Image (cartoon, helix red, strand yellow):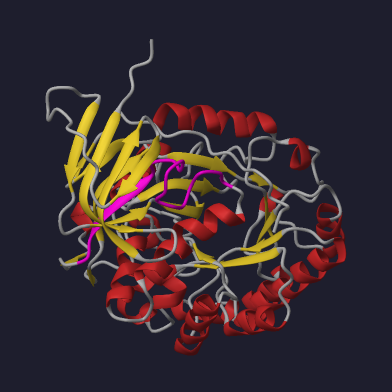
Amino acid sequence: MTVSTRLLIRHARILQPNGEFLIGDVEVCDRQIVQVAPEIRISLPDGEDPTHQEIDATGLTLLPGVIDPQVHFREPGLEYKEDLFTASCACAKGGVTSFLEMPNTKPLTTTQAALDDKLRRAAEKCLVNYGFFIGATAEGLPDLIAAHPTPGIKIFMGSMHGALLVDQEAALEKIFAMGDRLIAVHAEDQERIRQRREQFAGITDRAIHSQIQDNQAALLATQLALKLSKKYQRRLHILHLSTAEEADLLRQDKPAWVTAEVTPQHLLLNTSAYETIGSFAQMNPPLRSPHDNEVLWQALKDGVIDFIATDHAPHTLEEKAQDYPNTPSGMPGVETSLPLMLTQAMQGRCTVAQVANWMSTAVAQAYGIPSKGAIAPGYDADLVLVDLETYRPVLREELQTKCGWSSFEGWNLTGYPVVTIVGGQIVYDRGKLNTAVRGQALRFDSLGDR
């Protein structure tokens, strides 16, 4: 006989699906939300029965749990940087209740066997829900069509080496012509990057990174991906859009089956960060100009860009301390993304409802993830209670990510998670993680329906 678990969240400021707020209660039974109301009259034993819990959320705001659709969690093969357990602890602390992880691990996630291995590892280790992309190679393996479950095919069009680099149009076209599964692209033109590496060879100033992998490199690749997507009516997602030129392109020409994302760092950091945080500013695609920041913000608010991802990509402090160009590109992000964006909302740059849409609802819709992204009866109880009143700085010593640093260290933020709930279970509560909680493998339904 299965024992039901019940959770009651009382007196929260609840974000409703219509974008308005309700001061009230949420009842959760097992993994699902069963009731949302101004007052729910149920008396739950407090502290005596572990299957019944109650949270007093007075003064806190309840949002759908964040779905981070682009992360690099380094397992298997690169666990010295991060692993699925440490990364999912960081997710829980950051209000991220589900993630989609990328295929550039060792071995590469290019086969059903490699995908199955990741799913097995995640089931054993992950405190939050999970999904894993299948990686494309120039050979166009049959697993690209058949692998299951996966949110889609990841193509590195540039800034990659080895088997995952697919930079020739003929090879790309073969993949776009095969099947109907969503294709997510890292859009940078490898040939332009190669040429500019030669042009700027010998320069060790880290800021040169943004000139080597410049706006034009990004635009050329996005133009090609868009052309192939239109030719084959293929569901396309453009990862970490970073330039004004790409945003302007999509504003003029964005078919209904195309989506795009932006990272908090491409909204909030620019090339001036090289002077202040050095290699912690280095990522792919690189940081851009303040003008790019502004155009990306406007595109996000206008719906040209659909949602937000972190591109969480940790490296050790020792690796980041190397001289350019030997420093690896990438930065962690799952612990800071929600407070970063909620701080922007509290400063008037957007609304809390927009942040929740960009970081949860729109992601669930784009990837066909059922029962996620809203606080309503029948939806999964993946939730986060945040404090929008208190500000405090990002501190290195408080981070859960194994790499132990943040590009936003010292930033004074609000909207930090107080309680994170995954599948109706409290996984993070006022600074403490419940490492016994386990998330579930995500489902991806109707990806072609838009």
Residue ranking furthest to the top: 1
- Of 323 and 157, the residue lying toward us: 157
**Quarter holding the N terminus?**
top left
x and y, in percent, of residue 59 in the image: 16, 59
x and y, in percent, of residue 63 in the image: 34, 56
Vertical position of residue 423 compared to residue 356: above or below: above
Inspect this view and state whether residue 79 appears: no
Query: Hey, which quadrant is residue 248 in on the image?
Result: bottom right
Inspect this view and state whether residue 360 appears: yes
Residue ranking furthest to the bottom: 291
x and y, in percent, of residue 430 in the image: 17, 47
Vertical position of residue 16 compared to residue 216: above or below: above
The range drawn in magenta is: 369-388
Q: Residue at x 57, y 80 (%)?
A: 243
Judge whether residue 252 is colored magenta.
no
Judge whether residue 377 is colored magenta.
yes
Asked if residue 151 lies left or right of residue 119, the reply is right
Asked if residue 400 lies left or right of residue 382, the reply is left
Query: Hey, which quadrant is residue 349 in on the image?
Result: bottom left
x and y, in percent, of residue 103 in the image: 60, 46
Query: Hey, which quadrant is residue 195 in on the image?
Result: bottom right
Asked if residue 125 lies left or right of residue 175, the reply is left
- Of 230 and 55, the residue lying toward us: 55
**Quarter holding the C terminus?**
bottom right
Residue ranking furthest to the left: 47
Q: Residue at x 63, y 41 (%)?
A: 150
- Of 335 and 206, the residue lying toward us: 335
Magenta stretch: dominant secondary structure = loop
- Of 86 and 50, the residue lying toward us: 50
